[in-house]
Image (cartoon, rainbow, N blue to C red):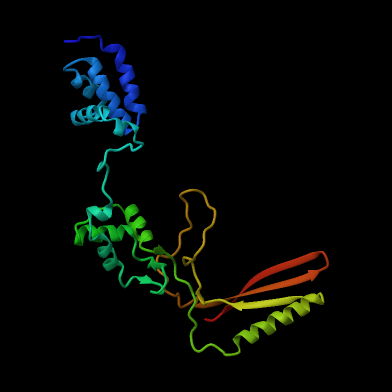
Amino acid sequence: MNIINVTPFDKLVSLINNLSNEKSKRILLSKAAEAYGNGRKDHIVGLTGVTYPTLIAGKTDSENDAVISNNRIRREGAGRKPTTETYPNIIEAIEKIIDGNTYGDPSKELHWVASTLSLRKISNILEKDYFITISYVKISQLLTDMGYSKQVNQKMEQVGIPSPDRNEQFEFIDHTAHEYLGNGEPVISVDTKKKENIGNFKNAGAEYRKMKNPRTVLDHDFPIPELGKVAPIASMSSITIPGLSILERTMTHLNLQ
């Protein structure tokens, strides 16, 4: 029986364990166990935390020249299986969950999920109804692979029948505006926005404030009868002077109480 002082080798074994990749670690630690002597695998296991099967696999790999020369780090079949292999029905389950909550042209590759259906909600439904437990991060990856993305609504549909002269009207406005600007005369553009409730209501956007001190607003958007509503009117004027361009924007409000 070969008995040696193992203390000088412990630091080297720790370095192998901490700095080597998976294949190198199991092979080198198995060889270290041989160098320590018979019956000292338990010392390697206690020092590094590797398992006995890992040391046995490392010994087998160390005697296989094909394994040593191969660039593959993990053994064939090792590692976590893909989610779609662990849960073969996961794609179909996600499709059923988001059915009715998606938008987009079916003939196109890109679709998007309604903002009300969060990734965590999908994860909860998968676990409750389909007994599939995966993280919301993985769900996001799967949705991307399935051709989905999360997007906000886009105002594209027009109320009523569009005017057949719509394009000609905008071309006339554009031509006239350029003509006036070319003569050095101002052009004013007026745009009426959607009516808004008057009061301390939540609105889109953000502002800089002290940390953990957001501006507080009313918890509901119910109109306040005594205040009524307002229609914001945005106007933009542009004056062009040789070598100088002035662009001014103002915002007024038309009370519609």
Image quarter of residue 242:
bottom right
Nearest the eye: 203 or 144: 144
- Is residue 60 left or right of 185 when viewed as pictured? left
In which quadrant will I find the N terminus?
Answer: top left
The residue positioned farthest toward the front in the image shown: 65
Q: Quadrant of residue 144?
A: bottom left
Q: Left or right: 250 with respect to 152?
A: right
Q: Quadrant of residue 165?
A: bottom right
Q: Residue at x 20, y 59 (%)?
A: 128
Q: How many marks?
A: 0
Residue 37 image offset from top left, x and y in percent = 20, 15
Q: Is residue 137 above or below residue 77?
A: below
x and y percentages locating residue 154 in the rendered image? 47, 72
- From the top left corner, tell me how far across and down residue 216 is, in percent: 46, 59
Residue located at (28% from left, 51% from top): 82
* Vertical placement of residue 163 versus 251, above or below: below
Q: At x 28% / y 27%, what residue is drawn?
A: 27
Where is residue 47 shown, x and y percent of the image? 25, 22
Which of 206 and 215 lies nearest the eye of the viewer?
206
| Viewer-closest of 47 and 86 | 86
When the figure is inspected, residue 150 is found, relative to residue 172, above or below; the finding is: above
Q: Residue at x 23, y 9 (%)?
A: 4
